[in-house]
Image (cartoon, rainbow, N blue to C red):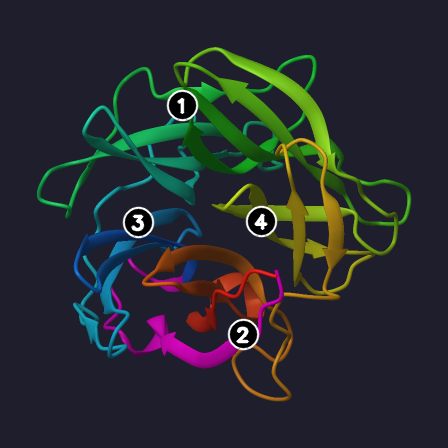
């Protein structure tokens, strides 16, 4: 599949919204949920004055690119209470439908020893689409002997009775070159509770692509397509691309094809990161962040689907 992305540019700038004590900066890790014909609700993570992330949203019409509900942001999911797995923030991964309920899966931030770490958790979207409910037993995947340090943003697809999950896992905080080694791994489950892990699926290259984040996966015909953030040794995030037949082994292109690049100047001139790719009316839409991990807002790129 060859894609030519048309960068529409910045569509949502959180710095133009009225600030409050709860909503301070950033609009990171966008996730789009369809409300109706052409209309999507885009959820994102905003940081409060303490740097803890909470969830808000705006609405996007993908036909005319009109934005709705972009004024004073509304909190729909707060970070957890002290001692909870997400006491330091909620970093959005993906959304799926499960038994007629829309669930979001997210990175649950905490700082138990002064250094952040993450687990993977979920929350349920209420029928009003403007509030999430966090069940008491909402842990999906925690650290263990295979993933002993920290986990990050999951992406889940349900297919033929199996949940496929791609997620981030820290191998070490410092590989010896001043940069962490954080890879994308793959797991399967029949019930979203018990997972079989298959290990690293996007092989890292030290100093070039050794810190990965926020995979976004779609399936077209019989091929999986993944977009992800990656960086080398202390450089800025770029968006990479890979494809796979089985979801486990991937042909990796990084930034060589089917991706967008930083602009020459402006809000996404230093980095592009945290892609969210979805399909609507034979087009691909990519929501993404720019400079400073979403502090400058959310952008949009569009590509026609052309299978070859």
> Label 2's element?
loop
Q: CA distance from mark 1 to mark 2?
A: 43 Å
Marked residue nearer the N-terminal end (1 or 2): 2
Of residue 125 and residue 109, the one placed in the foreground of this image is: 125
Q: CA distance from mark 2 to mark 4?
A: 15 Å
Q: Residue furthest left?
A: 128
Q: Which residues are magenta?
A: 1-26
Marked residue nearer the N-terminal end (3 or 4): 3
Work out whether residue 22 can be spotted: no
Q: Check residue 5 in the rendering and tell me which mark sits there, or answer none.
A: 2
Tell me whether the residue at label 2 lies in contact with that at label 4, contact meaning CB atoms closer than 8 angstroms. no
Q: Which residue is mark 3?
A: 55
Percent across and percent down for residue 225 are 58, 49
Marked residue nearer the N-terminal end (3 or 1): 3
Identity of the residue drawn at 52% across and 46% down: 217
Judge left or right: residue 138 versus residue 134: right
Identity of the residue drawn at 41% across and 28% down: 121
Percent across and percent down for residue 212 are 68, 47
Q: Which residue is mark 1?
A: 83
Tell me whether the residue at label 1 lies in contact with that at label 2, contact meaning CB atoms closer than 8 angstroms. no
Judge left or right: residue 238 versus residue 217: right
Marked residue nearer the N-terminal end (2 or 3): 2
Q: Check residue 225 in the rendering and tell me which mark sits there, or answer none.
A: 4
Of residue 210 and residue 195, the one placed in the foreground of this image is: 195
Q: Residue furthest front?
A: 308
Residue 8 drawn in magenta: yes
Q: Nearer the viewer, mark 3 or mark 4?
A: 4
Q: Check residue 164 in the rendering and tell me which mark sits there, or answer none.
A: none
């Amino acid at each position: 599949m060859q894609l030519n992305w048309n960068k529409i540019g910045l569509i949502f700038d959180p710095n133009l919204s009225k600030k409050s004590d709860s909503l301070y900066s950033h609009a990171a890790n966008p996730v789009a949920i369809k409300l109706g014909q052409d209309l999507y609700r885009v959820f994102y993570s905003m940081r409060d004055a303490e740097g803890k992330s909470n969830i808000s949203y705006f609405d996007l019409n993908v036909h005319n690119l009109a934005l709705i509900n972009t004024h004073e942001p509304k909190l729909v999911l707060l970070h957890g209470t002290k001692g909870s797995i997400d006491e330091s923030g909620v970093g959005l991964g993906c959304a799926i439908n499960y038994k007629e309920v829309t669930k979001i899966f997210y990175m649950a931030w905490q700082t138990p020893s002064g250094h952040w770490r993450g687990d993977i958790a979920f929350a349920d979207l209420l029928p009003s689409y403007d509030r999430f409910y966090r069940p008491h037993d909402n842990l999906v995947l925690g650290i263990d002997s295979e993933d002993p340090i920290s986990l990050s943003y999951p992406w889940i697809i349900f297919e033929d009775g199996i949940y496929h999950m791609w997620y981030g896992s820290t191998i070490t905080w410092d590989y010896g070159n001043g940069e962490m080694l954080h890879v994308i791994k793959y797991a399967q489950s029949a019930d979203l509770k018990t997972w079989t892990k298959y290990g690293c699926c996007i092989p890292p290259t030290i100093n070039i692509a050794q810190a990965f984040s926020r995979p976004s996966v779609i399936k077209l015909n019989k091929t999986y397509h993944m977009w992800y953030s990656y960086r080398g040794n202390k450089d800025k995030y770029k968006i990479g691309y890979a494809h796979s037949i089985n979801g486990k082994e991937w042909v990796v292109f990084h930034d060589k094809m089917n991706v967008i690049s930083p602009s020459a100047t402006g809000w996404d001139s230093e980095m592009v990161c945290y892609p969210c790719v979805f399909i609507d009316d034979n087009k691909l839409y990519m929501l993404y962040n720019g400079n400073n991990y979403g502090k400058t807002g959310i952008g949009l790129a569009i590509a026609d689907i052309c299978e070859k």
